[in-house]
Amino acid sequence: MEPILFILFGAIAVAGSIMVVTRKHPMASALYLILTLFAVAALFVLRQAHFLAAIQVIVYAGAVVVLFIFVIMLINVPENKLPVERLTALRFLGVAAAGLLILEGAVLARKTTMPGGTAADSGSVQAVGRALFTDYLLAFEITSVLLLAAVIGAIALAKKKI
Amino acid sequence: MLTEFATVLVFIVLGAVTVALMLGVSRLLQPRDQTAVKLSTYECGEVPFGSSWVQFNIRFYVIALIFIVFDVEVALLYPWAVIFQRLGLLAFVEALVFIVILMAGLAYVWKEGDLDWVRAMQENPAGKGGK
Amino acid sequence: MPLGNLASVSRFLPELAVTATILLLVAVHVVGKNRQSSASALLSLAGVGAALLLTALQPSMPAVSLFEGMVALDGFAVFFKALTALATIVVIFMSMDSAELSGKSQAEYYVFLLSVLLGMFLLSSATDLVMLYLSLELVSIPSYLLAGYLKGRKSSNEASMKYVVYGATASGVMIYGFSLLYGLTGTTQIAEIGRALATGKAALPLFLAAVMVAVGFGYKIAAVPFHMWSPDVYEGAPTPVTAFLSVGPKAAGFAVLVRFFYTVFASPDGAGGPWTLSSPVDWTLLFAVLSAATMTVGNLVAVNQKNVKRLLAYSSIAHAGYMLMGFVLLTPAGIQAILFYLVVYLFMNLGAFYVVILVANGTRSEDISDYAGLGSRAPFAAVSLAIFLFALTGIPPFSGFIGKVYLFAEVINRGVYWLAVVAALNSVVSLYYYARIVKVMFLEEPAEKAELAVPAFPRALLCLLAVPTLLLGVYWEPVIRVAANSVRLLAF
């Protein structure tokens, strides 16, 4: 069952992200992004990372995409004035390079064993909580300073004049 | 644990099927004679005017930004609540430090007046730009 | 054995001082009335000064690992903490004098500046991938905000935007490399990663991961080919911020580059040595090419610049290339040369930018042509700038020369002669464009003859920057000894 679900959600995620970058209207891109983020959340669940899956839905699909949509509405480019993206040689090259990288990664992943993340419940909320408040406590506290700088930065940026 | 998520999967599948079914059946049964009036946007029986794409006030954006930051904060406190009883006082202090640092951010937002929605709208009724 | 969370707090005082100052800045801003008052600057000075003092007083012997292995407290970390705190103090003074920033709300600026400082403290001591990534973001995100602080100026907005896009891409690539490393080893501790990889298995995935990680670090030090953001950001950002970015985060970037590669790749007994981990590529050659490319691109493009800030931006790319020379062989002597060069670079580069600020305060211009006749209009500033520029060129008896001697010595000792030749040729090129500014200042007639007043306080600060620049050129023994000690203690 698991491999089938993995392929299913993986395919949804990849297809969704292709749609995100190829849609003409940014609003459509944003909606496809939600689809992709949900599919990735499902992949997290399959890897037993339940907490991460919840965060993915709450923070990314819930809050970040809403922010994207606000920005799209704020800039509000009329449909006939949307920039036309042209296919340049550089873009093809970029896609080819990305494909090569993915291929390399796949080949290497098949050839090497990856021992990381072996514990069965390492992604549960309890396990994350334990790690966050014991081993990774400093990282947790520093996050608050980063968030503080971010909130002040957000306000300062949105103002016309500081 | 994974089986619990099966419920979610079933829910998603059922939801998708229901929507597809309703739209599909309606598509099969509906008579199709489209006129200009029928195709226009429904605006409470009035004749629609202008575009439904209006420019959002930048204040939505500011609020959304602040929301994200505090959303992340709450998300990080969720595992704390789960293990709180096991770690006891130490965990309480740890979370307290975290919250106090972020409270400084809230105080800043408050002082800058970005939480006063009504006042800001009166000052700037056109709804263009922030402070 | 790493110390626990509670036991670590008492060894974490400099960071706590900076954090407390950030909170105080916000509190004062919330309570206070005057947004432009210099209270924020003075408070920041006190806070960073306290952090510097606490860093100096901190016993770094023996080196310990803090917070369950998140950060290390060793001579290397202490060295970089002192260096970045010192740079921040100078930048705070520069910001107080800058006309660009006066009339702007002050508290936010200093909150961002101190957040970057906290990030740099952590970046130079992080020994865990999670902490490393987080501190890199703590350096980056407030830096974006600082670069875009002049919201009325288009180039400042552009700077911020470009910085964000490049920064996000680089850190995305880097964290992908981290995930590969975690997958290969099952741990986030860099020391354990080094131990796990020392078996020599999985050489190819390791190479891929290390290259991706190097992208993130290379972006922070603005090494070619990850340098594209820096000229635009350096030109558009407020000048004190440019000075800060060219010294502080660059130093922290070198710290993390050295610590990461030294811990993961050098032999685990701490003796160091040139790239002990087996690999399908020649790391020395790879980084030597990177170093040569960085200095060459930086210097060649700098030749044609008309804006002083942009010229100094390219010159700072070139200097990152020189410093990479010390990294190429991953030997203690090479790293010692980097540390020494960073100290020298701090004084000469901040000094040069300080003169740019003072001149811009008077002329509202950063074009080289407007420096004409500065020798007669503001002799003090002009002579100081000449000192800093000659030091940046690296000609004796200025301190830049000694810094370069140490960098060259290691490369030549280990037989990478071609790199030394490239670097020497580059120094010649750099002499051309640095000397051009000096020529414009002293030999060309000014369009306007009025004297440019430099107040007493900036004069004193310029002296404080110029004296070490000169002194380290003749008496550098203590600094090199400190640098040597700092390398030896790099244990975790």
Image (tube, coloured by chain):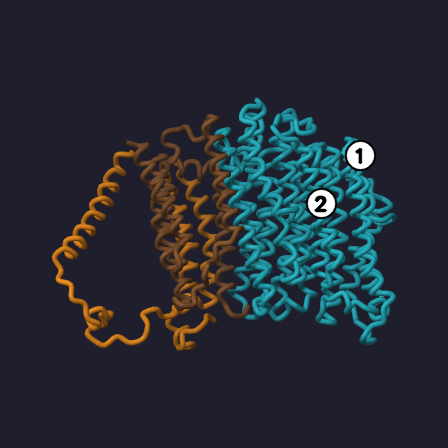
Chain colours: A brown, B orange, C cyan
Q: Position of residue C84 (x, y in %)?
A: 67, 49
Q: Is residue B95 above or below residue C434?
A: above
Is C81 left or right of B112, judged from the image as shown? right
In this rendered view, identify the residue nearer to me: C176 or A53.
C176
Tell me if I can see residue B81 in this picture.
Answer: no
Q: Which residue is mark 1?
A: C412
Work out how far the residue at label 2 is from the one at label 1, CA to CA, in angstroms.
16 Å
Asked if labels 2 and 1 share a chain, the reply is yes
Q: Which residue is mark 2?
A: C321
Q: Position of residue C33 (x, y in %)?
A: 54, 70
Work out which quarter of the rendered image holds the C terminus of chain C and state it: top right
Is C151 left or right of A130, judged from the image as shown? right
Query: Quarter-wise, where is residue A161 in the image?
Result: bottom right
Q: Position of residue C319 (x, y in %)?
A: 73, 48
Q: Is residue C53 above or below residue C231?
A: above
Question: Quick one: SS at disc 1?
Answer: helix
Q: Residue visible at 60% across and 31% down?
A: C264
Q: Earlier in the sequence, mark 2 or mark 1?
A: 2
Question: Quick one: SS at disc 2?
Answer: helix
